[in-house]
Amino acid sequence: MAHMAQKLTHRIVKSLPAPTHGNRITYDTDTKGFGIRVTAAGGRAFVLNYRRKSDGRERRWTIGSFPNWTTGAARDEAKRLKRLIDGGADPVGEHQGERSAPTVADLCERFEKEYLPRKREWTAKGYRQQIAADILPAMPRLKVAAVTYCRC
């Protein structure tokens, strides 16, 4: 639920009442799309609403919580993000892409399903043992894109 727009200051952000349920966003009059979300529990976080250039879909990016972020710093970050968005960036989409990227465990599962059936029985058994004993215990949730070669 949106609240009346006004120039957000530290004093205003601090004094906004918590809604009885859900959350309420108060938007800034100076920076379009920038606002403060206040939850029923009293939590406060700066947000930026924007539309993707590709399809016009509305997105909301959480900049950070108050008072960890000052109003001025959050407004500056919103302006920086808006410049990136104007250039075609999609912070929410990029974040979702990073979160849904395959992990080492996903890669191992695919390897076992697609590659090992074409191998001889003993070779496949050796690979499965190495995956179970060395790879999965060490880095099951690591994103594949984050894996690098180490010449140790």
Image (tube, rainbow, N blue to C red):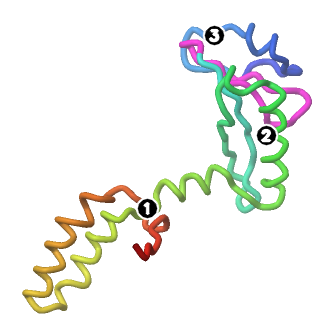
- Mark 3 lies on a secondary structure that is loop
**First in residue order: circle 1 vs circle 3:** 3
User: Residue 36 sits in which quadrant?
Assistant: top right
Q: Is the residue 92 above or below the residue 130 in the image?
A: above
Q: Kindly identify the amino acid type of the residue bearing the numbered disc 2.
A: Glu
Per the image, the residue denoted by label 3 is 18
Q: Which residue is rendered at x = 73% and y = 38% of the image?
A: 48
Q: Which residue is rendered at x = 87% and y = 20% of the image?
A: 6
Within the magenta stretch, is there residue 19? no
Confirm or deny contact between disc 1 and disc 3 (CB under 8 A). Answer: no
**First in residue order: circle 2 vs circle 1:** 2
Q: Separation of disc 2 and disc 3 at Cα?
A: 24 Å
Q: Nearer the viewer, mark 1 or mark 3?
A: 1
| Of residues 13 and 136, the one drawn nearer to the viewer in this rendering | 136
| Of residues 3 and 64, the one drawn nearer to the viewer in this rendering | 64
The C terminus, quarter of image:
bottom left
**First in residue order: circle 2 vs circle 3:** 3
Per the image, the residue denoted by label 1 is 143
User: Residue 42 sits in which quadrant?
Assistant: top right
Task: Read off the magenta span.
Answer: 25-42
Q: Separation of disc 2 and disc 1 at Cα?
A: 27 Å
Per the image, the residue denoted by label 2 is 77
Q: Which residue is rendered at x = 38% and y = 62% of the image?
A: 103
Q: Is the residue 146 above or below the residue 114 in the image?
A: above
Within the magenta stretch, is there residue 34? yes
